[in-house]
Amino acid sequence: MNSIKGLIIKDLLQLKSYRKTLIVFILIFIAVSISQESTVEIGNMLVLMMTLGLGMFSIATFNYDEMSKADRYLLTLPLTRKQVVRAKYALVIGSTIVGSLIGIILSSIITFVMSKNVPNLLDLGLMSLGGILGIGLIESIQIPCIYKFGTEKGKIQMFIVTAGIALLAGGLFYMGEKANLPIGNLFESLNQFLPFVLIIAVVVMYGISYRISVGIFSKKEI
């Protein structure tokens, strides 16, 4: 556990150089969110943008590690390859969750200040889970691609795979509508279970992605 904690601290120290950029992004996110017409849209937009933004920021640590050949050094330490991968996933997932929490807090404050109304934390929580699912899908594809192809080629492979999944999902949805399948009614009936469905989907995605990454990194020559 201490080894993983040390790896996470190492990555956080690397991300310190991004702190000014992160502050600028947060201010931009707030400005874009406030430009929305209603306080509901403000809250939803800010939660989504903060979740996606901080989730993607943590991916930058892969660039640092690749440029400095950090993995070659780390594996000379009493660390297993599984621990190195586990630390990356802990950082990425933790950053995404922190981003969603910051988004909920900021959107609640802005909503209260602008409308004097108490924000709907349940709706913000659902929006946060939706954002985590969205960025989780991207990260679950991107991280194994980075381990397999490197940061630059990995981004290209991730884009191709993500586009393929989006096209497949869109095609299935379109065919379902053409066939008059009750897709809308199905979503409505699952609405009360939506938080649990989202949480399970996120856990399953990251779990599968983690196992794939461990398998790739375990066989990779450093």
Image (cartoon, helix red, strand yellow):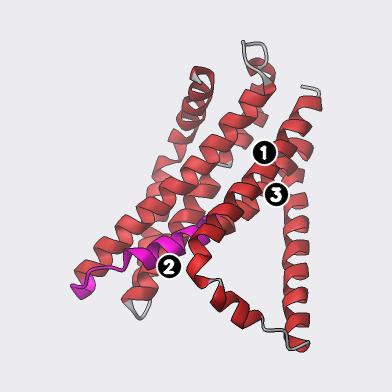
Q: What residue is drawn where x is 43% and y is 56%?
A: 50
Mark 1: secondary structure: helix
**Classed neighbour count for the residue bearing mark 3: other residues with Cα under 10 Å, few (<14), some (14–19), many (≥20):** many
Kindly report the distance in space between the C-alpha atoms of the residues bearing marks 2 and 1. Answer: 29 Å
Residue 179: x and y in percent read 78, 87
Amino acid type, label 1: Tyr
Q: Say whether residue 128 is magenta.
A: yes
Mark 2: secondary structure: helix
Amino acid type, label 3: Ile
Mark 3: secondary structure: helix
Instruction: Using the image, determine if residue 199 lies above or below residue 62.
Output: below
Report the residue marked by disc 1: 210
Rendering quarter of residue 80: top right
Amino acid type, label 2: Met
Rendering quarter of residue 62: top right
Report the residue marked by disc 3: 141
Rendering quarter of residue 78: top right
Report the residue marked by disc 2: 45
Magenta-drawn segment: 114-132
Q: What residue is drawn where x is 74% and y is 39%?
A: 212
Please indicate, yes or no, whether residue 182 appears anywhere in the rendered image.
Answer: yes
Kindly report the distance in space between the C-alpha atoms of the residues bearing marks 1 and 3. Answer: 10 Å
Where's the C terminus, which quadrant? top right
Residue 58: x and y in percent read 53, 41
Upstream in sequence: badge 3 or badge 2: 2
